[in-house]
Image (cartoon, helix red, strand yellow):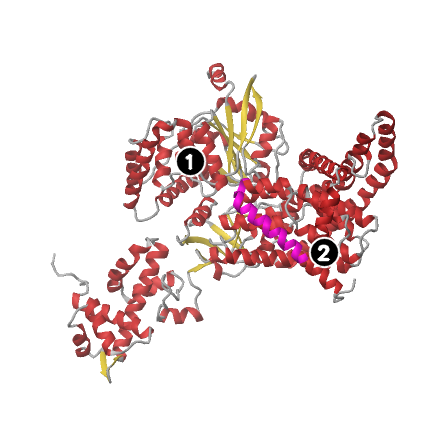
Amino acid sequence: MHETTLDKVVASQSIVLVGNPNVGKSVLFGKLTGRYVTVSNYPGTTVDVSRGSGWFMGQQHQIIDTPGILSLYPKSEDEKVTRDLLIEERPQIILQVADAKNLNRTLLLTLELALLKIPMVLALNISDEARERGIEIETELLSKILGIPVIETVGITGEGMSDLRRAIPKAQVPTVTVNLLSEIKQAIESLTLLLPPHPAKEFIAETFLYGDSSITIPLSHFLGNSLLSCLKQCSDRSQMVRKRFLRPISLLTLDSRHQKAGEIRAQVTQLTGQIHSSWIQKIGKWAMQPWPGYLFVALALFFMYEFVGVFGAQYLVGLMEEGLFNKILNPAVTKIVEISIPIKFIQEMIIGPYGLFTMAITYALALIFPIVTCFFLFFGFLEDSGYLPRLAIMLDRIFRIMGLNGKAVLPMILGLGCDTMATLTTRVLDTKKEKIIVCLLLTLSVPCSAQLGAMLGMVAGLSWKVFAIWLGIVIGSMILVGWGASKLLPGIRSPFLMEIPPIRKPQFYNLFKKVRARLIWYVREAVPMFMLGTFILFVSDKIGLLRIIKKLGNPIVVNFLGLPEKATESFIIGFLRRDYGAAGFFMLAQNGLMNAAQITVALVVITLFMPCIAQFFVTIKERGLKTTLLIAAFVLSFSLGIGGLVNWIFKAGWIQL
Amino acid sequence: MTTEKKYPLPTSEQENIEEALGVLWHQSELMENRLEVILPLLEETVNKEIYKTLISKELLKEENNKILLTEKGENLAKDITRRHRLAERLLSDVLALSSQAIDPNACKLEHIISTEVAESICTLLGHPTQCPHGSLIPKGDCCEKATETIEPIITSLDKCTPGSKGKIAYLILQNHPDLHKLLSLGLIPGTPFNLHQTFPTYVIEAGETTLALEKEIAEKIFVRQ
């Protein structure tokens, strides 16, 4: 072999990881680059491209992780991301990552990728699960048939990784071909004549033939705009050709490829034994059935309350705040600042009532940090175990009322972690209508973990009625608003269709890395905002602006909502970060400045209140300025309106706490 | 070799009669039997003489300006409607013709399908009750028997009970993106499946893939048990 020459060709080039959803592309990406990207047992976790670099055979390569795709002929936005990247950047190597136990689907994609004429390597990942199910694959034979290196790997444990590293520089353009129907072959050929020179001409012609002209955009990036007319011509011509076929052409070619994939699979696989149904898979089955599935949902909620609300928000926060900050850190820092900085103004800026340390850092690290850590641990556990898709099944019926389907469960639950992150994952939804509804509901009724934790802390020790009223109002509003939006917005609801991954034992190491990555992200995101918010409060206080705002806010905050005047501050910083606002209320409640009725009103309003700045910007990015402003305006008036109503009900004495 | 065909194709007069009876059956479904409406309709869809022909063959009678099918006529009309609508189902479900292509082809097929073939198609399709346009398919003998004795050979997944096993027969092609997704996920004709549950959503295991789907999609998946 000419390994040395190949090495040179591959130098400083890019490798793209491509594969079906939930086959472990991100795990392999992490192993190859040492960079961590979110990994979970949930199809569609990666919605965007991640880039890193890795060394093979003494050369540095750019490595790119992509959202999972079922086909190279995209049906959804995230599939388009991957296709466009492959066309636009035309990487030197494609590393196809596959679920070894699902060879049919894998090969279907391989046969499509082969059309790109890019050197490929196939990694049969999760091969341990395949072996467990008695599926044995003759990799050498498969490699011969496809004309590319084939390696068995287990991403999580690192099995087969060194073989994979050695195989990557030996990537080859696949030699395997599929016999399409002759009419289709002719049609594709006639279209390729119109196209500018490109190695993947046939693939481009086929895409046009299916009536998908969106490929023009990445192509023109790759080829330059001068060839746009060429592409336009080809696209127009394909419309004519398409009319000649009675059945959709894409289905006819899919049929041919399926057949080929089936043939290859039959050649290379052997079923060695019986499939063992382990107890873990039994739990997986139970979790989807009404009984005991709904019990599982209730248990999950209960454990979340116990772990995040009680252990995190009360026990850990108590330790951090009372023990560490109030007793040790704050007095110490106060001493140091008082001694080292003689200027009163700066002293107050750091350690005053609106001090950067005494307020911002204390809130961020003592109040919120323990809570989000617990939430991310809990959420990560659910994610990695594969429970979330099962939860999607259980909640599908409720989501239907809101014009959504079970798929929306992921963004909504992730929203309990961070609404900003969750807004990004709305891309996994099928229709624009669903995306808008989820963005709206995330803004309105899904509190983020930090906020939730602070709020659970406020509820603790009060009557269960407070919790019940709050939960009832929030869920009621969510369903009502979702239902209303689904009726008002144009478009249709798409039916639920989701692949359910097997239940897996969460790997402690992966869980730990994931939580760490999310916490770092959180601290980077939150602490500067906390600082900024505190600084704004501090300056406003000094120049007297705070008093004016409080006065202006009085009719609403004090009269309409019946909250103490100081609550206005929490609303202001709530605009910057929801959890910061919630933390403000938490402190008010802890210091005994609010009674049970006021706490209930505060909880309801802060939950339904505006999105934080980060979420606001992400929503603009995903849904556009106009939609975002409409959402914000609606949410603001709705939250205050409901808060006022609750206050009025308490005042009228209809409900006693 | 004789030039005479052993099984002649229906003559055009026969075809016209059947065509006219199909129209009359549909009108009777719509509760329409007024002479002034039916007569022009027949003349337009078939020809001018057909009314007289039907009367002379005792398939039709007229009473007080109302047109009524005789017993013989009704049986024949019911039969032709059944054949037409079954043909439509066959063309759309199994042969997956586009919706424009279904009607003209069904119109030709209905005349050459014999009662036995109609029964086989009906059984193959699992005794469907509606045509692709939503009109009722008149029941045949095979349907009456089926409800008592045999399970239909092909049914839509939403009619299966939890725990049933079989093979995927075909998918109905109305919603393309979903269909494509199902196929790319490995739900191809011939794949063995195992239906896990039907509530809160359908869960189906096909090959190494477990899929959750709603009734709307399950209705479009036809399986052989």
Q: Relative to A357, is B128 on the left or the right?
A: left
Callout 2: residue from which chain? A
**Image vertical order of residue A356 relative to residue A381, above or below:** above
Q: Nearer the viewer, residue B56 or A377?
A: A377
Cα–Cα span, label 2 and label 1: 60 Å
The residue positioned 59% from the left and 25% from the top of the image is: A162
Q: Nearer the viewer, residue B57 or A49?
A: A49
Callout 1: residue from which chain? A
Q: Could you say where residue B220 lies in the image, as x and y percent from the top left?
A: 44, 56
Q: Are marks 2 and 1 in contact (CB under 8 Å)?
A: no
Q: Which residues are magenta?
A: A621-642
Q: Which residue is mark 2?
A: A561
Mark identifier at residue A112: 1
Secondary structure of the residue carrying numbered label 2: loop
Q: Residues within 10 Å of mark 1 (few under 14, many from 20)?
A: some
Q: Could you say where residue A184 lies in the image, as x and y percent from the top left?
A: 31, 40
- Residue B129 belongs to magenta span: no
The residue positioned 51% from the left and 36% from the top of the image is: A19
**Can residue A603 be seen at all in this image of the molecule?**
no
Q: Relative to A9, is B142 on the left or the right?
A: left
Under mark 1, the amino acid is Glu
Under mark 2, the amino acid is Leu
